[in-house]
Structure formats: structure tokens, C-alpha cells
Image (spheres, helix red, strand yellow):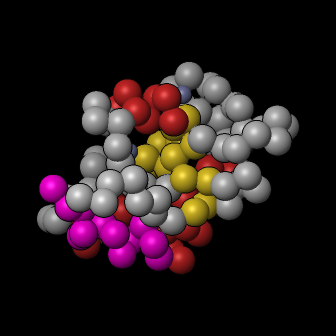
Amino acid sequence: MAKDFSKGIYNSRRWRAVARAYAESQHYICERCHNRSFAGTGKPAHFIVHHKRHLNPENVTDDSTVYGWDNLELLCIYCHNAVHSQGLDRECRFDDDGNPIGIVNHNNG
Ligand SMILES: [Zn+2]
Ligand SMILES: [Zn+2]
């Protein structure tokens, strides 16, 4: 189902700032497999700042859940896909320069 409750967050400046700061703190290294394809390769970064406790309509208003580093995990696209069995989630991706980018619309219905 649509995740409209989290859309505003993932498009917000605050989330991007938090996600970027967190990713930098992890040196853009996947926390699970230690893949660091971003660093030094010049290739597109396939990293996502993931919420360990997935956001839902109840906890989305809780700052510590949404923005607290305790609940964040930097994952490469492969590990992130493994976490979300559907392989489809919108949290935070990074462009070639390591800048967080917003929601990418994969699914138009
Ligand atoms: Zn990984
Ligand atoms: Zn995720």
C-alpha cells in the first residue's frame, strides 16, 4: 500500500541532512557487508539510509525513530533489498556526489 505517511519525511530537508550526516559518519561503507563501492570508485552510490524499525503511521511522528541515529543503518542496495524482501522501499538514496536524493518513483500504481 502507499506509504504516504513517510513521503513528506523522505523528501524533507531535515531527513536528507540527517541521512547524509549519518552516511558520512559511516564513511559510506555498508554496515552489513562492508561494501564501499561508493568510496573512490566514482560510480553511482547505491547506498540507502535504512530505518531499523521501519516507519509506520504510528511511529512516524516520533523524532527519535525517524531521525535518531540509533534507528538508522547505512546499507548498500543489495543488503537493503535483502532487508526488505520486496526490494522496494524509499528511504534515502545518494547520487554520484554522495548527495541524498529524494524519492524515486518506481511504482506508479
Ligand atoms: Zn551491503
Ligand atoms: Zn529500508
Indicate left or right for 107 with 18 as reference: left
Q: Quadrant of residue 44?
A: top right
Tell how many labels. Answer: 0
Query: Which quarter of the rendered picture does the N terminus lie within?
Result: bottom left
Indicate left or right for 1 with 4 as reference: left
Whether 78 is drawn above or below 9: the answer is above
Task: State which image quarter holds ligand 2.
Answer: top left
Asked whether the viewer can see residue 29, the reply is yes
Q: What residue do we see at 45% from left, 72% from top?
A: 11
Q: What residue do we see at 73% from left, 52% from top?
A: 96
Residue 106 point in image, percent of width and height: 39, 53
Residue furthest toward the top? Answer: 33
Residue 3 lies in the magenta-colored region: yes
Asked whether the viewer can see residue 51, the reply is no
Residue in the foreground of this view, choosing between 81 and 108: 108
**Which range of residues does the magenta coloring cover?**
1-12
